[in-house]
Amino acid sequence: MLTPSAKPGAAGSFCLVLHGHLPWVLHHGHWPHGEVWLFEAAAETWLPILGVVEECVAEGTPVPLTLGLMPILLEQLAHPGFQARFPRWLAAQAARAVADHAEFSARGDLHLAFLAERWRVHYTGLAARFEAIDRDIAGAFARLAAPRDGGPGHIELLTSNATHGYMPLILHDACARAQVRAGVATSARRLGMRPKGAWLPECAYRPGGPWKPPVVHGDTRMRAGVEEIFAQEGVGFFFVDAHLFQGSRSEGIVGPGGVAGGGFAKVGWDQATWDEGRGWRSVLEPHFVSSNGGPGRLVALARHPEVSEQVWSGEVGYPGDGRYLEFHKKHGAEGLRYWKVTGARTDLGAKHPYQPDDIAGAIYTQSQHFVAVVRAVLQRHQERTGRHGVVVAPFDAELFGHWWSEGPRFLRDVFRAMAHDPAIEPTTVSAFLAAHPPDKVVSLPEGTWGAGGDHRVWLTDELKWTWEAEYRAEDRFLDMLDRLPWKTDAGVEGAMKAAARELLLLQASDWQFVVSTAGAVDYGFRRFSEHLARFDRASNVAEARAKGEPDDDLARLELEDIRLHDAVFPDLSLEWWRA
């Protein structure tokens, strides 16, 4: 059954997709790398975006946001440690603002004192808001996504891999499936629903077929494609970068209704080059994806480069406007921000004080410009093909609020403007696909949305050893899964589950990312090494228990260390690694 269009005369649709992710940082440091990352994300991104959605809902403005709350983020937002320590951090920020106000007032800088008072009010308000939702950020978003009046929710939520595991370089299909199964199970448990779509970590896609591991193993082996692995868990769509569509190969067209099961006709690999009317390879069209040349089971949607660069580009992006709050300059090491961007090349010492009264006009102008860009793109596509296209704009959620303080208000004004624009139909991805299902199937090349569109961020000479270690961990875990009596021995099962949690955490793409980008080199290496060591210790305990050896004090303490540091995925099942 197709969902009727809310704007029958619209030139096309618009899907805003935000990707919310942080690696597991609870109990792994505080500042500058550690729990403060999570506190800042909650205060600067999640609570403000939640407020914007609720404001739009209250005023009757549709705000069909498609939001990925990654499973490892959900685990942290629901953790008692976060829910207890986040209010204390907010109180400390408010106290810092009070101290700043006294300092600025004493030296006669009344404008900075005024800004300090704004910060105090801001953090006090966030603390009250956190209490009003019973300290449950994920639950508040889940309520907004819940079906209402027999129809969809206000927003749509996505799932992903459990710990943001980097799919193209995971060695064994069993481990790739476990990442997905753990992620989907966690989303269902924490959100009370099974999301229909997924965010691929780093938008990294791998097709099925022959593959040779880059380290350790020199054999060529067959592996499953991303679309096959996610489809087995009931996921229906995902997102990729534009260059994967540009490098795609036409495989087939699907019949009436757009559902692959409704009729599939094979086409030549060159049809995409001459059949322009069907929108092959267009980032404004959804495509079924297949690695084997047959009907596709999952739908891929591509990021629109021209639209997305209006926000993320360092050259033309809105966050670089001189009126907005400067991210990099703080009053003290962990202090608050009191200055504006001023200019792209302005030295931090020469930044001017922030002027809040300048912001509403800047946001309005840029939100109108953004909507005009989307409108023009959709109208060009309709004029060229006669088809209803879709602009997909995926971003890291932390851009809005954390990196760009005014970002959530920009999103609010974009949705307000689109609500009154007859040419644009803002929608969630599921609603769009229900009304406008794909009519073509392609095979995609391997790639990511990272630098170079390939694996260069995660697989460098400096990082090769991490993959050697990770592959050996995968090999060892699957070998233990086959050999050890975990189905009949609870002690072995407990140690195996501890090892499984550490393997999932070890596979997070974040550790290589923060090393390669020089964002937190020491922290990235330390976190990877710690999870690797804990995996080995838990595996050693499992092996010893399987031999009937009694635990010594060290074994018990090592498992307790894992429990205290990495209390994630309480429903973990070793069956997730089985075929």
Image (cartoon, rainbow, N blue to C red):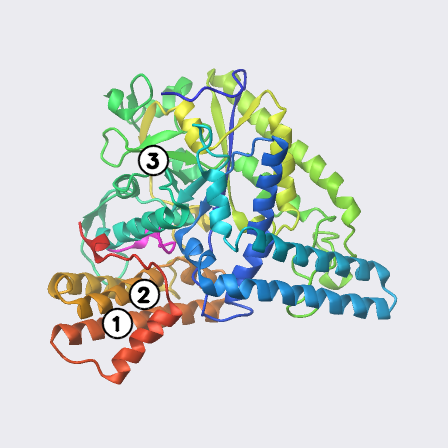
**Label 1 with label 2: CB-CB less than 8 Å:** yes
- Label 2, secondary structure: give it: helix
**CA–CA distance between discs 1 and 3?**
36 Å
Q: Nearer the viewer, residue 535 or 204?
A: 535
Q: Which of 559 and 339 is in front in this view?
A: 559
Give the labeled residue for mark 2: 502
Q: Quadrant of residue 316?
A: top right
Check the image and report above or below for 549 versus 148. below
Circle nearer the N terminus (1, 2): 2
- Label 3, secondary structure: give it: loop
Q: Quadrant of residue 416?
A: top right
Label of residue 236 in the image: 3
Q: Which residue is drawn at 63% across and 45% down?
A: 407
Circle nearer the N terminus (1, 3): 3
Residue type for callout 2: Glu
Q: Position of residue 336 (x, y in %)?
A: 69, 63
